[in-house]
Image (spheres, grey):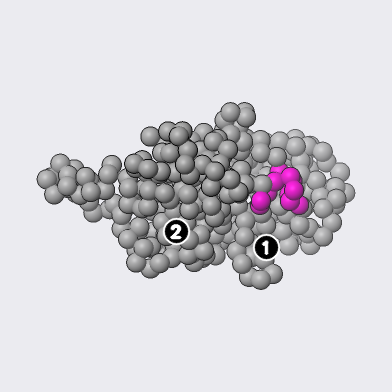
Amino acid sequence: MNRLFQMLLCLLGLVGPSLAQNDGAILRRIQERGKLICGVNTVLPGFGTQNDAGDYIGFDTDICRAVAAAILGDANAIIFRPLTGAERPTALSSGEVDMISRNTTWTLSRDTEWGATFGPTTFYDGQGIMVMVDFGVSSIDKLTEESITICANAGSTTELNITDLIESTGAAWTLNTFPDTDAGMDAYQAGACDAITSDLSALISRKATSADPAAHVILPGAISKEPLGPVSPQNDANFADIIRWVVWGLLTAEEFGIDSMNIGDFMDTDDAGIGRLLGLGDNVAGDYLGINDQFMVDVITQLGNYGEIFDRNLGPDTIFGLERGFNDLWMNGGLMYAAPFR
């Protein structure tokens, strides 16, 4: 809905008070502050960590930057707030952060009890288990026959899923939980746990960055579905819409073949779909959301499209070497499918 038209409807009493009260508060706060505050992981290489210079890097942190670029025109107009898994709901509900982009699984209880709105899934994942090669098992089924101690993150879907597996199989496993992946991995590598469980992406990250990657094996298969994506407070539909359309804009740009290197070639396009995505000419895009019509030009120029963000942080040329898989575009057999800019 056009923002001016929406305001007129509010004045005429043609839309409910909740829309007028809740819509846009977070956007105004960000614009007044001049920075977006985004809750992130700092201990998961490839998704969220700090480099030697102290800069926040990773797939999830780039999603934060994309939202900052859309709202403020500057991907670096951002404050990163490190969060453990257990800290996420309080940080969101208290207003400590504007949004979270931190390997967070979309579930029914989180959607409701956290007072959260989940954006589109940015990474389709599943939970796996990693053991030392010397442990001598080749499958999760074989592992359930062993009496082991397994490490997991506390207050996470990881803990809940592995508990379900233990109960359903009757496995003689002892579960040790830790506040973050670093602590769990340290315990696992020190021999305090025989195995460690987390999202497969996290296990791949930890294996690749360990002192001896060849010493670990990620057992085949997944024990859960883990749709990961950004989260915002439920009481501001406008801000949730901004996150939603930024993510869909990243996917749509990749569909059109628009990236950070060639976007200049599309600024005088005659293609109506591209014109709507980039907010060119008389095309309205950002005005629906209360931001610049060419917000996706800023996002793509500074961050690239979805594929660029994936490849830069996780792709074949990184130490993680992840294939796109489910995270490829729908036209390539993946699950990534954006609503149309129209």
Query: Where residue 140 sits in the image (x, y, percent)?
Result: 74, 38
| Residue at which label 2 appears | 73
Q: Which mark is residue 82?
A: none
Report how many numbered discs are placed on residues in the image. 2
Q: Residues within 10 Å of mark 2 (few under 14, many from 20)?
A: many
| Prevalent SS, magenta region | loop
Q: Residue at x 71, y 36 (%)?
A: 221
**First-in-chain label (1 vs 2):** 2
Amino acid found under the numbered disc labelled 1: Ala
Secondary structure at badge 2 equals: loop
How packed mark 1 is, by other alpha carbons closer than 10 Å (few <14, some 14-19, many 20 or more), is some
**Disc assigned to residue 183:** 1
Select label 1 or label 2 by which is in front.
2
Q: Which residues are magenta?
A: 312-322
- Between residue 238 and residue 274, name the one nearer to us: 274
With 220 as the anchor, is 201 left or right in this view?
A: left
Residues 29 and 129: in front is 29
Q: Give the x, y percent position of residue 36.
A: 44, 62
Q: Is residue 117 above or below residue 193?
A: above
Residue 80 as seen in the image, left or right of residue 95: right
